Amino acid sequence: MQLHRNCTRLATVFFLLLAPSLGNAQTLPNVIVVMADDLGIGDVTPTNADCKIKTPHLANMAAEGLTFLDAHTPSSVCTPTRYGLLTGRYNWRSRLAKGVLSGKSEHLIPADRPTLGHLMRGAGYHTAMIGKWHLGWDWHKDGKQIDYSQPVLNGPDINGFERYYAHCGSLDMPPYVWVDTGMATAIPERQEGVTAKEDPYGWYRKGDISPDFHIEEVLPHLFDKSIAHIHEQASAKDGKPFFLYLALPAPHTPIVPVPPFKGASGMNPYADFVMQVDHHMGQLFAAIKEAGVDENTLVLFTSDNGCSPQAKFDILEEFGHDPSAVFRGHKADIYEGGHRVPFIARWPAKIQGGRSTNALACLTDVYATLEEITHQERQPAGGEDSFSLLPAFEGESSTGRTSVVSHSIGGSFAIRKNNWKLCLCRGSGGWSAPKENVAKKQGLPAMQLYDLAIDPSEQNNLLDSQPEKAEELLALLHQQVHRGRSTPGPDLKNDREVAYLPGE
């Protein structure tokens, strides 16, 4: 325990030494980053005019802010995207080559890796994380059994967050235990779970559950915690601005809308759950205003990947709703529906409302954006794949980002430059048809090249007719992989040997 505290203290001192003197911290904005879970780009009205789910509070956020129409997650699944958001670094540079962590996995981000928590703490912010972590932490284990009475080590606290209140994995992954800055709030006394046969929407895996952990109440509970935190920080006497990372467990499974949202959409429980997320976002904005910090608070709202098939696309289609909008694929896939997501920024003091932008953006860009907002100089490490979004906030058509690398659950790569996208796989790289094994049996080409300007739904593979474009994109990917960064700066090492060419 003492070693853990010393490592945390040394990491904090290290990042504080890197930060410049920032003068009056009160001039800096409060920052709240809200990440939904499995929310598709077609599921909210600001990014889909044909959306059939009512999301008035997010529509109002867009009316008062800036909507990115070409924003991407670094991965099409949970854990790696969260890594990319917090580090400003593509997830595939880490030791996690594919897939996601579980609720019992060890920590993924080491203490000496720069993160948003370190960045904002170094700028004089109070930093907090609330919600779904899904980046692993180290439970105290006696053999395979977790001793919940012992401190949790290497959680968000080693990654720059002064406080955190979180569960470790997705809401369908045990253990179902709240951890408050290193300590479980209650000890599990039993196991609980619901099968997909019992509830095709609200299922969750059987495992340990604490008496204060109630699945249906998790979403409103986390917003209650966040609202209380905002009021606490707004009234704090230390004058510090605050940074809050609020990672929602919804509308990921278990899909458990509560009254009055249960049945409110007239479509299915997934649509109801999206409506509930929107309602709670309205509560969050009301709290910011009540706390008197609305004008100088930057709120970013996004999702960690596209919508999951658990939403039951076929049922939603009966009502004319498509969670992926015009795009192909969904969560887990290399196609646009897997990683193109809603991304809205609201900051009354800085951003003129009611605008949208086609500027290419990635969630890794939050790092460089906050770095610039807090007047910190770019360091050799930290935000290696991050471009500041401030130019877009100020009305410019580009942020300087011209390319983005995407990654699927199976570890397949895609690289996009301007309107051209090269997928280094035969199929979806994920869950939608054709899966890789099927695509190989069908004899499909090892790579796919699309012109998104004329083919946003990725139907016409131009690999044979545009081989020079594929070669250009492949060379760019090679450079970005082997330089350890896609931004200007010194070459760095990846955490592992990165293989990106499609397998035979």
Image (cartoon, rainbow, N blue to C red):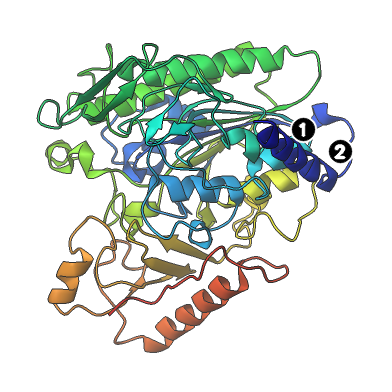
Task: State the image coordinates of residue 478 (x, y, percent, origin top left).
Answer: 51, 78
Q: Which residue has dot 1 on it?
A: 28
Q: Quadrant of the C terminus?
A: bottom left
Q: How many residues crowd around disc 2 within 10 Å: few (fewer than 14), some, or many (20 or more)?
A: some
Task: State the image coordinates of residue 257 (x, y, percent, origin top left).
Answer: 27, 20
Q: Is there any visible trace of residue 114 in the rendered image?
A: yes
503 relative to 119, above or below: below
Closer to the camera in the image, 6 or 47: 6
Q: Nearer the viewer, mark 1 or mark 2?
A: 2
Give the residue at x 75% y 14%. Answer: 236
Q: Secondary structure at mark 1?
A: loop
Whichever of callouts 1 and 2 sits on the residue coming sooner in the sequence is 2
Give the residue at x 42% y 88%. Answer: 468
Q: Are marks 1 and 2 in contact (CB under 8 Å)?
A: yes
Task: State the image coordinates of residue 130 (x, y, percent, origin top left).
Answer: 53, 26
**Distance from the alpha carbon under mark 1 to that under mark 2:** 9 Å
243 relative to 313, above or below: above
**Residue kind at label 1, given as amino acid type:** Leu
Task: State the image coordinates of residue 441 (x, y, percent, origin top left).
Answer: 13, 75
Residue that extends furthest to the front in the rendered view of this protein: 143
Q: Is there any visible trace of residue 346 in the rendered image?
A: no
Q: Secondary structure at mark 2?
A: loop
Q: Is residue 307 left or right of residue 148?
A: left
**Number of marks drawn:** 2
Q: Which residue has dot 2 on it?
A: 22
